[in-house]
Image (tube, helix red, strand yellow):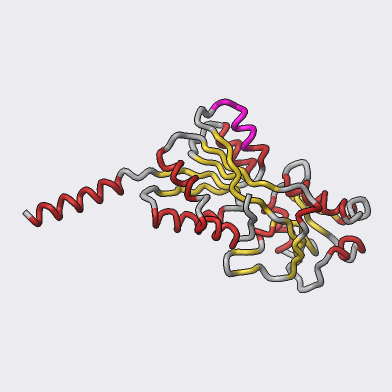
Amino acid sequence: MLRISILLVTLSGLGSVAFGADVRVAVSNQFDFTLEELKESFEQSYEHRLVLVPGPSARLYGRIMSGESFDVFLSDDPRRTEALHNSQRFPEASVFPFSRSQLALWSVRNRPINPSVLQNGDFELLSMTDPKLSPFGQAAMDTLKAFDAWESLQDKLVFGENIGQTYHFAISGDVDMALIPFSQLIYGRYMQAGNYWLVPDAVYSPIENQGIQLTDNPGVEEFLSFLKTPAARAIIRGNGFASP
């Protein structure tokens, strides 16, 4: 009888795990490393499994609008989540903030980095994301205007189509510096080589990273609740983001 009871308890536990849901998450490249850490912590405490699909926000938005199935979209461009919400194609759609990005001026070279570098134009080339394509580009433009450098630096600017390309220009040495998200430089305990200056929040419009729930998958609610926990917030802050 004891063996039967143990067997029933074991089978019951296996059944509980089996009923955990796979939650497909489309995640912007800026947040994918952070979400890998969050996934590990989430799956240790919940029965559900996160299936991560990283990529540029614009491309992921296109995949969703083309019919590819995702339960959650974590975007670094609020325009994409708002457009999905307004499309009325997703009855369960609800938009939520999950972090704020911080902007940094960074050089892979060991050179002084501070506002006077922008004002004096003491460099050859600076990469930034195209303001027409990304809120990070808009924030970079706001920063240059705040330090009266936008007009004077036009001949020194190299525009990336997205964050990844902007970062690549700088890490490859094609440009001297880049205005990029701080999260591109900090990976938990590890910091990218070179020097950086964290741009004060006051000089550019807030960069709010928004997510959107797209389905009524039973694992989604628990995942969204998990993102609000102190443990999840600590991981997010540790990767260079601020609270929303």
In the displayed structure, 69 sits above or below 29; it is above
Query: Which image quadrant is residue 42 in?
Result: bottom left
Bounds of the magenta span?
81-89
Task: Kindly tell me whether residue 36 is visible in this rendering.
Answer: no
Q: Residue at x 80, y 72 (%)?
A: 111
Image coords of residue 211 (percent x, y): 58, 42
- Name the residue nearer the viewer: 72 or 203: 203
Image coords of residue 231 (percent x, y): 50, 58
Assign the N terminus to one quadrant of the image: bottom left
Is residue 154 left or right of 54 when viewed as pictured? right
Secondary structure mostly seen in the magenta stretch: helix
Is residue 119 left or right of 111 when viewed as pictured? right
* Magenta span includes 15: no
Image coords of residue 125 (percent x, y): 84, 60
Q: Residue furthest front?
A: 230
In the displayed structure, 87 sits above or below 102; it is above
Task: Kindly tell me whether residue 26 is visible in this rendering.
Answer: yes
- Name the residue nearer the viewer: 48 or 124: 48
In the displayed structure, 18 sits above or below 190; it is above
Query: Which image quadrant is residue 117 in?
Result: bottom right
Is residue 19 left or right of 95 when viewed as pictured? left
* Magenta span includes 88: yes
Q: Residue furthest bottom?
A: 110
Image coords of residue 145 (percent x, y): 87, 51
Q: Residue at x 64, y 60 (%)?
A: 240
Is residue 196 left or right of 150 when viewed as pictured? left
- Name the residue nearer the viewer: 54 or 40: 40
